[in-house]
Image: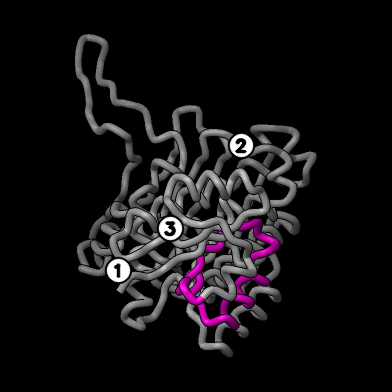
Amino acid sequence: MTVRFGLLGAGRIGKVHAKAVSADANARLVAVADAFPQAADAIASAYGCEVRTIEAIEAAKDIDAVVICTPTDTHADLIERFARSGKAIFCEKPVDLSVERVKACIKVVEETKGKLMVGFNRRFDPHFMAVRKAIDDGRIGDVEMVTITSRDPGAPPVDYIKRSGGIFRDMTIHDFDMARFLLGEEPVAVTATAAVLVDKAIGDAGDYDSVSVILQTKSGKQAIISNSRRATYGYDQRIEVHGSSGMVSAENQRAVSIEVANGEGYTRPPLHDFFMTRYTEAYANEIASFIAAIEKGAKITPSGADGLAALVLADAAVQSVKEGKLIKIG
């Protein structure tokens, strides 16, 4: 079976998913839609698909699934539309910036018996998957503490910051999902601190660029998250899981993994410069997982419920910073 895709949104992340879909032997990119014709034309030219409107993709008989890469404030409406049209849906995070809107959207998916996957790509990174497998295989005993470091090489434009929902809902939300993925228990309390250390304009826009979060589960397990919008040495992506009988970690990745030793010391090549290159395999793996779930009629994960859980944690982190205290999750 070949799953036929429509792509909604031809921006930066749309290009990443167009590449992943087109490279999969079990998929075919049929059409792309974007508000900017030049962006859509570029993807159509690169991958041999058609440029269509969203309405045409919605009604199309030759499209089985869609990848939603449009602005965040359009996600929930598009999910509902395509759930009602009977197409499987892959949507970039978040579903929406409002918990109540996400709940309403998930309800529509459930009522229509729709298929929805939320794009938490890091679950599909081979290195992070190997960490999860080490946990599942009992190699470190019971998980006790998770440490996640995620730092961007540089801050996005302030115009993006203003519509992103803030660092906790835009950036840390990936780490909230990864913490849930690794802890094996739901966090019940959140403590967060935040500062503006990178760019004053980010603070003027009402956001932060440097944050730390501690998540706690009912049994006492902890996840510690460190985020920054500035890492002068590259895209910093590390995790460590400490257990009752050991520890497993995933180090930073480099485009070339070599080390040179000479009279000046030990040197290694730089880290990947951003998510497009660091998580290439993860994007391919998540699309492959989505396709396999469609073909087999299997449960899709990460689901809308996973997207909701991460957003709830993000909201709690925002509240913790504002009130300067631990926030309990209901």
For marks 1 and 3, the one nearer the N-term is: 3
- Quadrant containing the C terminus is bottom right
Residue marked by disc 2: 155
Residue under the point 41% across and 56% down? 122
Residue marked by disc 1: 142
The answer to whether any part of residue 216 appears in the image is no
* Residue type, label 3: Asn
* Residue type, label 1: Asp
Q: What is the x, y in percent for residue 21?
A: 39, 58
Q: Is residue 303 left or right of residue 27?
A: right
- Quadrant containing the N terminus is bottom left
Q: Vertical placement of 235 versus 91: above or below?
A: above
Q: What is the x, y in percent for residue 156?
A: 63, 39
Q: Nearer the viewer, residue 328 or 287?
A: 287
Residue under the point 56% across and 51% down? 10
Task: Give the CA distance from mark 1 to mark 3.
Answer: 25 Å
What is the magenta range? Answer: 61-89
Q: Nearer the viewer, residue 324 or 55?
A: 55
Q: Residues within 10 Å of mark 2 (few under 14, many from 20)?
A: some
